[in-house]
Image: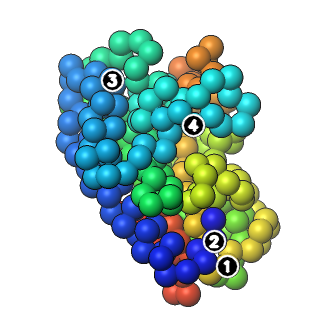
Amino acid sequence: MTIRDSIERENLIEGGKRLAAVLAVLEKKVAPGVTAEELDELAERLIREGGDTPSFLGYTPEGARQPYPASLCVSVNDEVVHGIPNESVKVLKEGDIVGLDLGLTHNGVIVDAAVTVSVGEVDEESKKLMRATEAALAAGIAAAKTGNHIGDISHAIQEEIESAGFKVVRDLGGHGVGESVHEEPFIPNFGRPGTGPELVMGMVLALEPISSAGKAAVTLAPDGYTYRTKDGSRSAHFEHTILIEKGGARIITK
């Protein structure tokens, strides 16, 4: 999406605030014994109480066999992204890490964000993995300036993850957002500076570094949505929706 007027901009910014508030509540709810379905139900209730719509519920991405059945993606440990919270019982345990990925539609404008959260006390490698992936998101945002290119974002993310000793999951990445959940351009989490589409004012992008503590290869589960690491290693995922402005990127979902 490219912002066309002040009304779209206001709706984007307001939607981002609302999504950030919902995600903050969900983060605090994460604890041993909590189920993924409880988190999903809470996410949907909070979004609807605000007068908005869950963007993922009923959304059918390209290539999917059926619509996504939940409002929230809950991905635990080796689940990389798009973990379904409500088709089987998924109980969080002490020491797990869990990715929470959520979309919200406010007055027709879609925003998208994700965090990876510790369940109780986790091991040092998991902490390092989450820190590196969150730092990669910050690096990608810093590179998102007018006149730069998608490759500058991609390269910044890759450098941060790999310098910490982890792997970039190359099959998945960020994307445009706003009018639909997934729009062009695709934003790989690896690449060369100066390559790809140029960044211009008004562009709305969802940056989402995705990393693995082991190998980068992933596999798609039979449910058609959940990606897992092939080697069973843990994965982390952080995401913000950003708006390209004159002075750099504005974080919409902060």
Amino acid beneath label 1: Val
Q: Is residue 108 above or below residue 73?
A: below
Pick whichever of labels 1 and 2 is earlier in the sequence.
Answer: 2
The quadrant in which residue 16 appears is bottom left
Marks 4 and 1, Cα distance to the nearest angstrom?
Answer: 28 Å
Q: Secondary structure at mark 1?
A: loop
Tags 4 and 1 touching, CB below 8 Å: no
Of 134 and 126, which appears nearest the observer? 134
Give the side of residue 74 with respect to residue 248, left or right: left
Q: Which residue is mark 4?
A: 59
Pick whichever of labels 4 and 2 is earlier in the sequence.
Answer: 2
Marks 4 and 2, Cα distance to the nearest angstrom?
Answer: 21 Å
Amino acid beneath label 3: Glu
- Say which residue appears at 58% left-offset and 49% top-offset: 181
Of 104 and 112, which appears nearest the observer? 104
Pick whichever of labels 3 and 2 is earlier in the sequence.
Answer: 2
Q: Which residue is mark 1?
A: 200
Tags 1 and 2 touching, CB below 8 Å: yes
- Say which residue appears at 63% left-offset and 24% top-offset: 66
- Say which residue appears at 49% left-offset and 26% top-offset: 69
Q: Which residue is mark 2?
A: 2
Pick whichever of labels 4 and 1 is earlier in the sequence.
Answer: 4
The quadrant in which residue 31 appears is top left
Amino acid beneath label 2: Thr
Amino acid beneath label 4: Tyr
Quadrant (top left/top right/bottom left/bottom right) for the N terminus: bottom right
Quadrant (top left/top right/bottom left/bottom right) for the C terminus: bottom left
Q: Secondary structure at mark 3?
A: helix
Marks 1 and 2, Cα distance to the nearest angstrom?
Answer: 9 Å
